[in-house]
Image (tube, grey):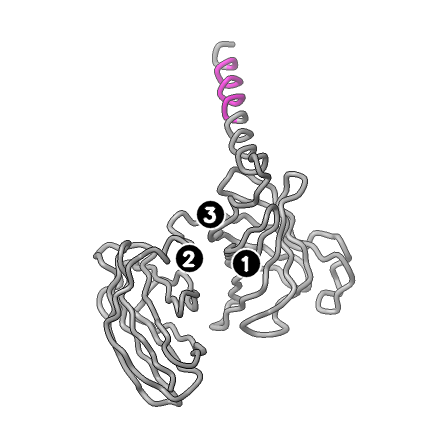
């Protein structure tokens, strides 16, 4: 009887703690969705549209207005092609809803859009829920409207730093170069020992590469330059096992090598290069 009493007491305390955490997130004074700011990562399990598989699920929220928010989904369909889609959402009736309606980057036609992701808060840093479509969709003829087609659990990445925090770091310009094209290709990699460095690349204050782990394999990205001076900064998201974060960056234009440089950054400073588009 004593053991049963202790078990019930512990269960009640745990339940109360979770409820309190959830209340802190949803019932804050201004009813804001501010707690959603950041990066959420987990796994999506799909069992509809002729697919029975699971995929990495990344949700990045960067803009909040009241109980509504905006950001991106990042999907990897198992190939080298990553997809980035527009995400809009809201906190309503003690639940969190994601709406996905447009592909920005990646393989068009590989995703079923116009779905709704309905989530509940396990605690302030975890969302569990399911995905459904709300109307007939030719990409998914076997899934009837409002029938569940997948489920997921995502957790907030505590190492993720939002742009507002990183923007306060001191930027040290290491080199300057000039190009005549509107776009250039950026390649970034760990040219030394892979030690878990996670970085972002910020162009004129906006992230163009978000929270990637530096590998010996090069990560490629095409970026668009504004007329005149552009500042490309390397931001450290963590410090890996061998501080500071060190990345090799290669810049090419029209297939020709323009510059290869090594940048170093920590949690206080971000090294950068300036690219002048003539």
**Alpha-carbon span between mark 3 and mark 2:** 16 Å
Which range is magenta?
Answer: 4-14
Q: Residue at x 54, y 21 (%)?
A: 12
Q: Would residue 106 be found to the left or right of residue 270 on screen?
A: right
Main SS of residues in magenta:
helix
Disc tally is: 3
**Alpha-carbon span between mark 2 and mark 1:** 13 Å
Mark number displayed over residue 4: none
269 or 244: nearer the viewer? 269
Which quadrant is the C terminus positioned in?
Answer: bottom left
191 or 6: nearer the viewer? 191
Q: Which residue is mark 1?
A: 71
Q: Residue at x 27, y 55 (%)?
A: 268
- Find numbered disc 1 in the image and state the secondary structure of the residue it sits on: strand
**Alpha-carbon span between mark 1 and mark 3:** 14 Å
Tell me the mark number nearer the camera, choosing from 3 and 2: 2
Q: Residue at x 54, y 38 (%)?
A: 25
Q: Residues within 10 Å of mark 3 (few under 14, many from 20)?
A: many
Mark number displayed over residue 156: 3
Image coordinates for residue 8, horizontal then vertical, percent: 53, 18
Q: Which residue is mark 2?
A: 163
């Amino acid at each position: 009887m004593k053991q049963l009493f202790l078990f019930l007491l512990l269960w009640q305390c745990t339940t109360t703690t979770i409820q309190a955490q959830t209340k802190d997130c949803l019932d804050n004074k201004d009813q804001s969705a501010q707690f959603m700011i950041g990066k959420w990562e987990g796994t999506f399990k799909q069992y509809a549209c002729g697919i029975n598989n699971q995929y990495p699920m990344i949700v990045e929220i960067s803009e909040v207005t009241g109980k509504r928010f905006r950001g991106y989904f990042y999907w990897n369909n198992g190939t080298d092609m990553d997809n980035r889609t527009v995400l809009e959402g809201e906190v309503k009736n003690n639940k969190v809803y994601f709406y996905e309606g447009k592909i920005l980057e990646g393989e068009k036609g590989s995703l079923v859009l116009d779905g709704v992701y309905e989530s509940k808060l396990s605690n302030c840093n975890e969302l569990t829920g399911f995905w459904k479509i709300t109307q007939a969709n030719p990409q998914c003829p076997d899934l009837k409207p409002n029938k569940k087609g997948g489920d997921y659990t995502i957790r907030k990445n505590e190492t993720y730093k939002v742009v507002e925090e990183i923007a306060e770091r001191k930027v040290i310009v290491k080199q300057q170069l000039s190009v005549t094209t509107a776009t250039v290709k950026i390649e970034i990699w760990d040219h030394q020992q892979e030690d878990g460095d996670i970085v972002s690349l910020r162009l004129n204050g906006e992230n163009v590469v978000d929270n990637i782990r530096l590998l010996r394999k090069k990560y490629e990205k095409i970026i668009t330059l504004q007329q005149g001076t552009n500042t490309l900064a390397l931001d450290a998201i963590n410090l890996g096992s061998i501080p500071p974060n060190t990345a090799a960056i290669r810049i090419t234009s029209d297939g020709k090598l323009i510059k290869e440089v090594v940048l170093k950054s920590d949690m206080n400073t971000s090294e950068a290069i300036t690219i002048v588009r003539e």
